[in-house]
Amino acid sequence: MSQELTPEQVARIAASRRQAQERLQQRAGGQPPAADAERPKPRLRGSKLSKGYYEFNLSTMRDTHAGFLEEDAAAAAAAAAAGSPEKRRRVVVSDERLPDLDDGQACCECSSADVDVVYLKVFKAAVCKACIEKIPDRYSLLTKTEAKDDYLLTDSELRDRALFPVWEKPNPHKSTWNNMLLYLRRDLEAFAVKKWGSLEALDGEFERRVEEKRARKEKKYQRSVADLRRRTRAEEWEKARRERLKLESEHEHAFEDSGNDGEQRCSACGLVIEVEEFGL
């Protein structure tokens, strides 16, 4: 059975309803509520990397089409002349901007307009993603180790940015390692042909190095076998010597004539001694 409200509770509910309706009317008319006007506005917290906090007027900033915003210099100078107390900081803008693809740039293989921006910016190769996957012999990316192994290039040649443009990416294996360097196969192959004369000459040089490596490995193996044989013979000789000394220390020699004049041989251990007979 529900209890009836007392007159005091009814009056309190009616007063709360009137206050709520007044606040709604004030907000609809653009005026802040009386309770909100008296309450102090909370101060925004800055980042951990800066002591203060910075406000930017987006209406005075210009889009550079490179993922960064640059503050208008005229607006910043006017604000400084007016003595604005607001703290402002210039956003760092990179000079490297993405190439403009609105000039009719098309794929050099299929004339498609869907040109890969990274290939065009880094390698100056106007090629679409479909052709990159379709023609890996020209447009695949190789790491530095693969470039050295496949085309027999040196570190100094791969460091020359005039010869090979490179795409640096964070190392996918571990973030603390050096950046991964990616080279375009088309550039590597063109330089290898110029260096070795032709792809057939490159294959011949590769086979020659493989054969030299195999010969060095075989020579090293033969040296190891010869050394093992020497050590085995030395161990056998040392073992026989120790056994002979052990027999000599554990038994009494029983010498007999060996058949040679002046020599006697022990029948147990085989020790041979020379005997001189003196006549009386």
Image (tube, rainbow, N blue to C red):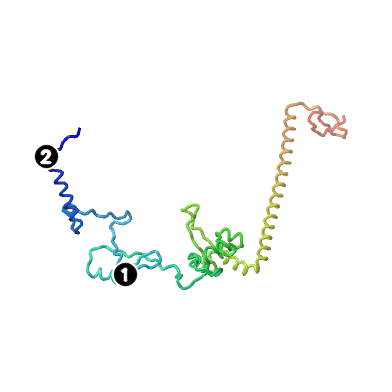
| Percent position of residue 16, x then y | 16, 46
Quadrant location of the N terminus?
top left
Q: Which comes sooner in the sequence, label 1 or label 2?
A: 2
| Percent position of residue 204, x then y | 68, 63
Secondary structure under the numbered disc 1 in the rendered image: loop
In this picture, residue 137 sits left or right of residue 236: left
| Residue closest to the far bottom | 103
The residue at 73%/38% (across/down) is 236
Quadrant location of the C terminus?
top right
- Badge 2 local density, few (<14 within 10 Å), some, or many (20+)? few
In this picture, residue 94 sits left or right of residue 280: left
- Badge 1 local density, few (<14 within 10 Å), some, or many (20+)? some
| Residue closest to the far front | 1
| Percent position of residue 226, x then y | 72, 47
The residue at 67%/56% (across/down) is 213
In this picture, residue 234 sits left or right of residue 52: right
Q: Which residue is mark 1?
A: 72
Front label number (1 vs 2): 2
| Residue nearer the viewer, 230 or 128 | 128
Q: Amino acid at mark 2?
A: Pro
CA–CA distance between discs 1 and 2?
65 Å
| Percent position of residue 207, x then y | 68, 60
In the depicted structure, whether residue 148 falls above or below residue 15: below
Q: Which residue is mark 2?
A: 7
Secondary structure under the numbered disc 2 in the rendered image: helix
| Residue nearer the viewer, 199 or 254 | 199
The residue at 35%/65% (across/down) is 69
| Residue nearer the viewer, 188 or 252 | 188
| Residue nearer the viewer, 222 or 171 | 171
Q: Amino acid at mark 1?
A: Asp
In the depicted structure, whether residue 195 falls above or below residue 229: below
